[in-house]
Amino acid sequence: MKRFAITLVALSSAIGASAHGQAADGLVITRAESRPARVAPGENFTGTVRVHLLFDTTAATRAYAASVSFDAGARTAWHTHPRGQVLLVTEGVGRVQRWGAPAEEIRPGDVVRIPPGVKHWHGAAPTTAMTHIAIVELQDGRSATWAEKVSDTQYGAAVSAPAAVRAPASTATTEAQPSAAQRLMGDVAPKLAQLTDSVLFGDVWARPGLSQRDRSLVTVSALIAMNRPDQLRSHMARASANGVTREEMIEAITHLAFYAGWPSALTAVGVAREVLPPR
């Protein structure tokens, strides 16, 4: 298997590259299952960070990208990029900071453009995992220069929240908003909440073998069959956001009535009435 040398978000380690799924008329398709996630090296990161290569440089291009998932509290060390970096936040709540300025909160949909040579770090919020796509370019064979790790004091300093989610002045807080798992169980079982965010939603749900849409349909079907209305409510809403249609979820309820029993199906109908928009 071909080997790529990657330092995404300046990850300086060699990771196995993928085989091409097919090529036609100059197009190259690299299949998701051929690009396994790798754990980032501890010398340049604090906490658990997984890197999933998306594309590498070619003979004609010098940019490459990866999806990088940070467990709650995980972050990069301070570093710079000779040609800058672009971050596209896809999940969770994170932080980014340039040297000499306060850290900024980042959320899904945010795009961070880091200029060449600017010393910075990025990672997850203290109680919430975060995933972003990082895009960098090589210059003279290098994509990054690493510096010291981010100290706990630096990481724990006040954070500036985005204006769109910032609380009024009288109630403003520097803490990131807790995840659904943190709100549900963080006060009683904080480790279980952290595992839910980082392992279940940060790792299992991010695996390339199934799309987010298909994972939602599988999860909704399992919760219907097990007659779990409390969890079904949140997962029906998540499924809708992931592209599962109302008609597909209703059809799953109808189908499972014959395999999981009428009571389970009737419970699911009640949840669907609450959660799903009317026809």
Image (cartoon, rainbow, N blue to C red):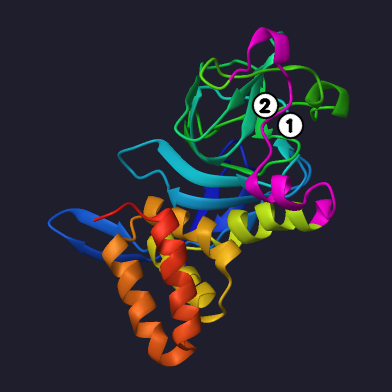
Residues at marks 1 and 2, CA–CA distance in whole angstroms: 6 Å
Would you identify the image quadrant in which residue 97 lies?
top right
Total numbered labels placed on residues in the image: 2
Q: Which residue is the site of mark 2?
A: 121
Q: Residue at x 68, y 51 (%)?
A: 181
Circle 2 packing at 10 Å, graded few (<14), some (14-19), many (20+), is many
- Report helix, strand or loop for mark 1: loop
Q: Is residue 30 part of the magenta span, yes or no?
A: no
Looking at the rendered structure, the kind of residue marked 2 is Trp
Q: Tag 2 or tag 1, which sits nearer the N-term?
A: 1
Circle 1 packing at 10 Å, graded few (<14), some (14-19), many (20+), is many
Q: Residue at x 80, y 19 (%)?
A: 157
On screen, residue 151 above or below 233: above
- 69 sits to left or right of 225: right
- 236 sits to left or right of 223: left
What's drawn in magenta, residue-wise?
A: 166-191
The quarter of the rendered structure image containing the C terminus is bottom left
- Report helix, strand or loop for mark 2: strand
Instruction: Choose between 6 and 75: the one closer to the eye.
Output: 75
Q: Position of residue 144 (x, y in %)?
A: 60, 30
Q: Which residue is the site of mark 1?
A: 77
Instruction: Choose between 39 and 171: the one closer to the eye.
Output: 171
Q: Are marks 1 and 2 in contact (CB under 8 Å)?
A: yes
Looking at the rendered structure, the kind of residue marked 1 is Ala
Instruction: Choose between 13 and 215: the one closer to the eye.
Output: 215
On screen, residue 173 above or below 195: above
Q: Residue at x 45, y 54 (%)?
A: 237
Would you identify the image quadrant in which residue 22 lies?
bottom left
